[in-house]
Image (cartoon, rainbow, N blue to C red):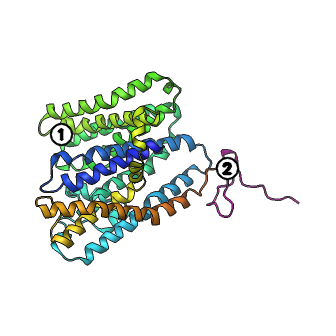
């Protein structure tokens, strides 16, 4: 889906711009758009994984192939980046390379950094702070296929809506009864499940016969901007501490993001803009850029100016701007050398036709088989 690659690329640019020019001590609030991008990433993950499960869940080796492909797609480059960043932080004994709060290496390698973030109300080392989203998504990837396997198709929509509402009430309950645990509402799957589930519901909607016809297209194109405007109004009206906005805002944003994703999938005119080669390039390299853009910024500011990242002086602006092409180059190299080859290997694990449940394919070796092509019968007599 070319347009979704472009959308992912635009969201990657939003995250980098937000972290480089907005979320620093002298940052400008106009650049703080990363939160929208993170919600859109979650919605995209929910939609794409949900669509994949709907298409392939009847394969006899569904769980094996699903988890192997997910592991090949996410784990190698993630593990490499985490180990490299820990090595750099350990080797550079400078104030600009230190963090006020550090989490153990094993927490990142097991995707449990979210637990430490919630317990300490801190993001850990800034160079690794974006990885909480990977932890949340990995938990989602583990749970969602099992939900589809154990819940009947006719009850899927109701179950997903119940999960979505439960996440909203859980956020509200924590904010009202245990406000010191506010970080929990941001980084745990139970309190953020509504954002991911919205994407899954979008995939379920498009798989329904009711999705045919132009009436749905008009509704989706209107829903996306209206929901985003409603979110802004909710923020303005709620004031401080904004418990209503913090409880309902993620759901409203994710519903708007889901509507926008579905308009692109259904070929709305807006999709043409997201097919631009530049956006597709950032979409292809988004995972590697997302993992490395913070350490690139921190290293460049530390090595050139001897300080942590900021844009308070012309020199700091210059280093931050210079870090942009560097993070793109690093992301491209990691995508070409690590992510693409391992993901290609993951795709050699093929989906097996349900009729051949006694044979679970291993990775394709010499001659690749087509999808749903049964293994050959053994020779007789």
In front here: 1 or 49? 1
Q: Which mark is residue 341?
A: none
Quadrant of the drawing holding the C terminus: bottom right
- Main secondary structure of the magenta stretch: loop
Tell me, yes or no, if residue 44 can be seen here.
Answer: yes
Q: Residues within 10 Å of mark 1 (few under 14, many from 20)?
A: few
Q: Image point 29% across, 68% down: which residue? A: 104
| Apparent side of residue 132 relative to residue 305 in the rendered image (left or right) | right
> Residue 223's quadrant in the figure?
top left
Residue sticking out furthest to the top: 215
Q: Which residue is mark 2?
A: 357
Q: Which residues are magenta?
A: 352-381
From this view, report whether residue 325 is shown above or below residue 259: below
Which callout, 2 or 1, points to the residue nearer the camera? 2
Q: Tag 1's secondary structure? A: helix
Residue 277 place in picture, x, y as percent: 42, 49
Q: Is residue 369 magenta?
A: yes
> Residue 330's quadrant in the figure?
bottom left
Q: Are marks 2 and 1 in contact (CB under 8 Å)?
A: no
| Apparent side of residue 203 relative to residue 320 in the rendered image (left or right) | right
In front here: 119 or 220? 220
Q: Image point 49% across, 46% down: which residue? A: 145
From this view, report whether residue 330 is shown above or below residue 160: below
In front here: 340 or 99? 340
Count of numbered marks: 2
From this view, report whether residue 140 is shown above or below residue 85: above
Residue 222 place in picture, x, y as percent: 34, 26
| Apparent side of residue 246 relative to residue 157 in the rendered image (left or right) | left
Q: Which residue is mark 1?
A: 176
Q: Is residue 341 magenta?
A: no
Q: Image point 28% across, 54% down: which residue? A: 16
Tell me, yes or no, if residue 149 can be seen here.
Answer: no
């Amino acid at each position: 889906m070319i347009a979704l690659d472009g959308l992912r690329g635009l969201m990657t640019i939003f995250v980098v711009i937000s972290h480089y020019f907005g979320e620093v001590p002298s940052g400008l609030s106009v650049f703080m758009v990363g939160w929208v991008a993170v919600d859109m990433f979650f919605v995209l993950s929910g939609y794409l994984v949900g669509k994949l499960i709907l298409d392939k869940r009847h394969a006899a080796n569904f769980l094996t192939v699903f988890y192997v492909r997910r592991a090949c797609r996410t784990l190698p480059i993630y593990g490499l980046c985490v180990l490299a960043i820990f090595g750099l932080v350990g080797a550079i004994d400078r104030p600009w390379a230190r963090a006020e709060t550090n989490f153990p290496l094993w927490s990142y390698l097991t995707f449990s950094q979210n637990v430490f973030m919630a317990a300490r109300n801190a993001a850990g080392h800034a160079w690794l702070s974006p990885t909480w989203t990977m932890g949340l998504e990995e938990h989602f990837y583990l749970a969602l296929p099992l939900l589809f396997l154990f819940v009947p198709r006719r009850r899927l929509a109701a179950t997903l809506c119940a999960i979505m509402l439960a996440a909203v009430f859980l956020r509200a309950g924590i904010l009202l009864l245990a406000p010191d645990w506010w970080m929990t509402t941001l980084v745990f799957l139970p309190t953020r499940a509504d954002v991911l589930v919205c994407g899954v519901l979008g995939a379920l909607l498009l798989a329904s016969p009711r999705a045919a016809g132009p009436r749905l297209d008009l509704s989706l194109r209107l829903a996306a901007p209206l929901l985003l405007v409603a979110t802004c109004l909710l923020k303005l009206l709620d004031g401080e501490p904004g418990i209503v906005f913090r409880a309902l805002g993620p759901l409203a944003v994710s519903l708007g993001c889901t509507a926008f994703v579905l308009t692109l999938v259904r070929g709305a005119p807006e999709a043409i803009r997201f097919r631009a080669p530049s956006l597709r390039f950032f979409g292809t390299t988004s995972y590697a850029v997302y993992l490395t853009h913070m350490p690139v910024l921190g290293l460049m500011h530390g090595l050139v100016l001897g300080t942590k990242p900021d844009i308070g002086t012309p020199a700091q602006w210059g280093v931050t701007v210079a870090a942009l092409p560097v993070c793109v180059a690093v992301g491209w190299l990691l995508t070409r050398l690590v992510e693409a080859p391992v993901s290609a290997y993951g795709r050699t694990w093929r989906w097996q036709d349900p009729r051949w449940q006694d044979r679970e394919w291993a990775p394709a070796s010499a001659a690749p088989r087509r999808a749903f092509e049964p293994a050959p019968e053994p020779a007789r007599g």
